[in-house]
Image (tube, helix red, strand yellow):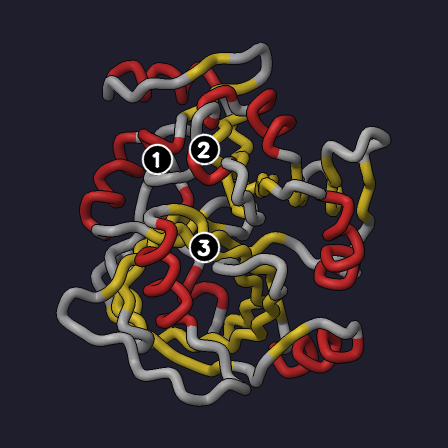
């Protein structure tokens, strides 16, 4: 069964500043939480049972030293990402129910994987109660995608402790994360990798300008820099699409109930955006390094 999008890791320089930005975009956010990786996060939970994770380094903590090559360091990865690339999307995550089975499946598919990572953290519920959450992660990397990583996320706690209707209601009507948009000089070269990673269908454009991984409502699109600029003119001149191009996560699409409702919020908060026939796009400059597309 194809893997489904669980969440995105959106690496930011300052958590409170990013939370303010996302509130201005019309999102509801969970209270900040501290992770045992030298990081802090705040989430945008969506009704479609996936979410966005705003992640920053913990100013009061340290990223633990990483000296075990058979284990992947979530903290070091995001610390290095911020240092080398600045703000942006650093990881794409798929839903998982058994991290150890996922590691085995990735190994059998010939992917580069690591020992599962188990951890827990506290979460503050809407009523003020503090609960303990537990997760297990199964990582995959690709040497041709430096600075990026993928993993599955298994939640080892009662779903009701994590998913809360109060956190899933958004002024902008956001309902579900439906697409991740990447750039690569030769998208078709990654078709085999994504097929094995997601265990789902991969469609290659006839002209080689892009590949589409998964279904229309659960998709990773990998586009050439030229095709990406056609879709997102906001990226024209973006240094990440220069001659020394390496694959990057460049944007994501969220399904909303009413694009006009999003537009009213952005207008009210003076956030620049572009309106198309079917969607609305916020540029990376206004969204911490990632283009956001809202579509009905």
How many C-alpha atoms fall within 10 Å of the one at disc 1: few (<14), some, or many (≥20)?
many
Distance, label 3 to label 2, CA atoms, is: 14 Å
Give the labeled residue for mark 2.
Answer: 291
Mark 1 or 3, nearer chain start: 3
Which residue corresponds to the image point at 33% horizontal and 30% vertical from the top-left? 285
User: Relative to residue 270, is residue 65 depicted above or below?
Assistant: below
Residue 5, numbered circle: none
User: Relative to residue 64, is residue 95 depicted above or below?
Assistant: above
What is the secondary structure assignment of the residue under circle 2?
strand
How many C-alpha atoms fall within 10 Å of the one at disc 2: few (<14), some, or many (≥20)?
many
Depth order, front residue of 175/240: 240
| Place of residue 214 in the rendered image (x, y in percent of width and height, measured from the top left) | 74, 46
Give the labeled residue for mark 1.
Answer: 287
Which residue is most to the front?
Answer: 243
Mark 3 or 2, nearer chain start: 3
Instruction: Answer whether labels 1 and 3 touch (C-beta < 8 Å).
Output: no
| Place of residue 120 in the rendered image (x, y in percent of width and height, measured from the top left) | 38, 78
| Left or right: 196 as drawn, with respect to 142 | right
| Place of residue 287 in the rendered image (x, y in percent of width and height, measured from the top left) | 35, 35
> What quarter of the picture does the C terminus occupy?
top right
Distance, label 1 to label 3, CA atoms, is: 14 Å
Which residue corresponds to the image point at 30% horizontal and 81% vertical from the top-left? 64
On the question of residue 124 being in view, the answer is: no
Instruction: Answer whether labels 2 and 1 touch (C-beta < 8 Å).
Output: yes
| Place of residue 126 in the rendered image (x, y in percent of width and height, measured from the top left) | 27, 55
Give the labeled residue for mark 3.
Answer: 90
| Left or right: 280 as drawn, with respect to 56 | right
> What quarter of the picture does the N terminus occupy?
bottom right
On the question of residue 101 being in view, the answer is: yes
User: Relative to residue 50, is residue 240 depicted above or below?
Assistant: above
Instruction: Answer whether labels 3 and 2 touch (C-beta < 8 Å).
Output: no
Which residue is most to the right?
Answer: 206
């Amino acid at each position: 069964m194809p893997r489904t999008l669980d969440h995105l890791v959106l690496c930011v320089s300052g958590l409170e500043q990013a939370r303010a930005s996302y509130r201005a975009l019309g999102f509801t956010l969970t209270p900040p939480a501290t992770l045992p990786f030298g990081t802090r996060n705040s989430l945008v939970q969506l009704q479609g049972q996936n979410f966005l994770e705003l992640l920053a380094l913990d100013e009061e903590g340290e990223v633990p030293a990483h000296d075990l090559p058979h284990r992947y360091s979530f903290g070091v990865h995001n610390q290095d990402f911020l240092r080398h690339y600045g703000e942006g999307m650093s990881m794409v995550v798929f839903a998982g129910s058994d991290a150890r089975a996922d590691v085995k499946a990735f190994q059998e598919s010939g992917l580069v994987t690591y020992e599962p990572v188990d951890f827990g953290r506290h979460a503050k519920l809407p009523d003020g109660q503090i609960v303990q959450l537990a997760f297990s992660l199964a990582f995959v990397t690709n040497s041709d995608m430096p600075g990026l990583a993928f993993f599955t996320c298994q939640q080892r706690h009662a779903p009701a402790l994590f998913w809360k209707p109060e956190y899933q209601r958004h002024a902008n009507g956001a309902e579900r994360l439906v697409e991740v948009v990447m750039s690569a000089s030769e998208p078709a070269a990654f078709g085999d990798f994504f097929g094995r990673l997601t265990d789902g269908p991969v469609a290659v454009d006839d002209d080689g300008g892009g590949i589409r991984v998964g279904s229309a409502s659960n998709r990773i699109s990998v586009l050439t820099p030229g095709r990406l600029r056609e879709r997102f003119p906001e990226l024209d001149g973006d240094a990440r699409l220069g001659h020394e191009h390496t694959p990057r996560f460049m944007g994501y699409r969220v399904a909303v109930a009413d694009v006009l409702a999003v537009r009213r919020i952005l207008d009210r908060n003076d956030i620049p955006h572009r309106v198309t026939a079917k969607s609305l796009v916020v540029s990376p400059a206004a969204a911490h390094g990632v283009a956001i597309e809202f579509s009905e």
